[in-house]
Image (cartoon, helix red, strand yellow):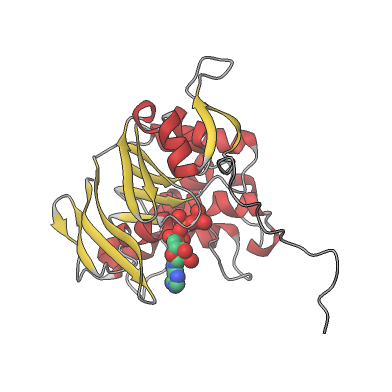
Amino acid sequence: MRITAEDVVWSAAGTPVVRGVSAEVAPGETVGLLGPNGSGKSSLLRCLAGLRAPDSGTVRYDGESVRGWDARRIARRVAFVAQEGGADGELRVADVVGLGRTPYRSRWRGPDAADRAVVDAALDRVGLTALAGRPWKALSGGERQRAHIARALAQQPRALLLDEPTNHLDVRHRLELMELLAGTPQTVLVVLHDLSLAARYCDRLLLLHRGRLAACGPPADVLTEEQLAEVFEVDAVPAPDALGRPSVAYRGPLRPAPPPAGAPAPVPVSRSVPDEK
Ligand SMILES: Nc1ncnc2c1ncn2[C@@H]1O[C@H](COP(=O)(O)OP(=O)(O)OP(=O)(O)O)[C@@H](O)[C@H]1O
């Protein structure tokens, strides 16, 4: 499914957060959504997932505006995985994953054999089959994360939108998830903070800076030394890793430029002598 943002604007409490973003994710593409903390990634992702109505601009699925669509219609197209998804502590893992079938069920019908088969397949894809009967509250953070991804897969969407899905995962599960996302036929838009992971697994990257699209394109075109300095404020270079795969090497955070010679000395932040009362 093709997801299109046309000049999307979204504000929180009167402050613009997403400032006129136009971008497209093509059917089957795996696209990384990058940017520093607070740059508007989650807010844009929620607009694209139909969870927030933009103040202005249009979100389209396969060319059709989603404005006014109900949750069920959207959930048959798009599955959203939040940064910290919750669930009722009394549920079992398979029940949480089974919530992904909700858009296909009437209110009066429980899960049938076909639903259970989809849930089993989703649990298998994230390696959680052995934990299917375990209480939700007994899971570790990484296991919950994988269960939420299984819930999204059980939704059988045409597109997966994921907000930092790797943040609780150990190295192996992180790599497994990225392979799953890169290999799935569905359209994927995924927020990532690990630039090397994004460079390696994503077809294209969208780079947000202060709510605007600073760059978009193949990883090598987006993760340039200049963009890394300008947007992320780091001294870094795109450099293949030891196995020759795309990666980013960091020298460190960028330091503010030293004041020119003759400039007044900076005011000290702390005082050694307490203020007189
Ligand atoms: N509902 C809200 N009310 C007030 N401010 C909000 C709201 N949602 C987002 N913001 C603000 O908008 C800015 C962008 O937030 P957003 O969560 O979209 O950023 P992000 O790029 O996903 O950040 P991070 O990498 O830290 O998760 C932040 O300054 C945030 O505090």
Examine the rendering and report whether any part of residue 262 can be seen: yes
Quarter of the image for residue 140 reads bottom right
Q: Is residue 55 left or right of residue 51?
A: left
Q: Name which residue lies at 42% across and 68% down.
A: 110
- Horizontal and vertical percent for residue 12? 38, 72
Residue at the (42%, 32%) spot, across then down? 226
Residue 115 shows in this picture: no
Residue for point 21% across, 67% down: 56
Q: Nearer the viewer, residue 268 or 74?
A: 268
Observer-nearest residue: 127 or 74?
74
Give the x, y percent position of residue 112.
Answer: 41, 60
Q: Between 92 and 15, which is closer to the camera in this rendering?
A: 15
Q: Residue 270 in the image: x percent, y percent?
A: 76, 63
Left or right for 173, reference 60: right
The picture places residue 258, in percent across and down from the top left corner, at 59, 41
Figure quadrant of the C terminus = bottom right
* Residue that appears at 64% across and 46% down: 130
Is the N terminus in the top left, top right, bottom left or bottom right quadrant? Answer: top left
Q: Please state the total of marks drawn on the protein image.
A: 0
Identify whether 212 is placed above or below 172: below
Quadrant location of residue 217? top left
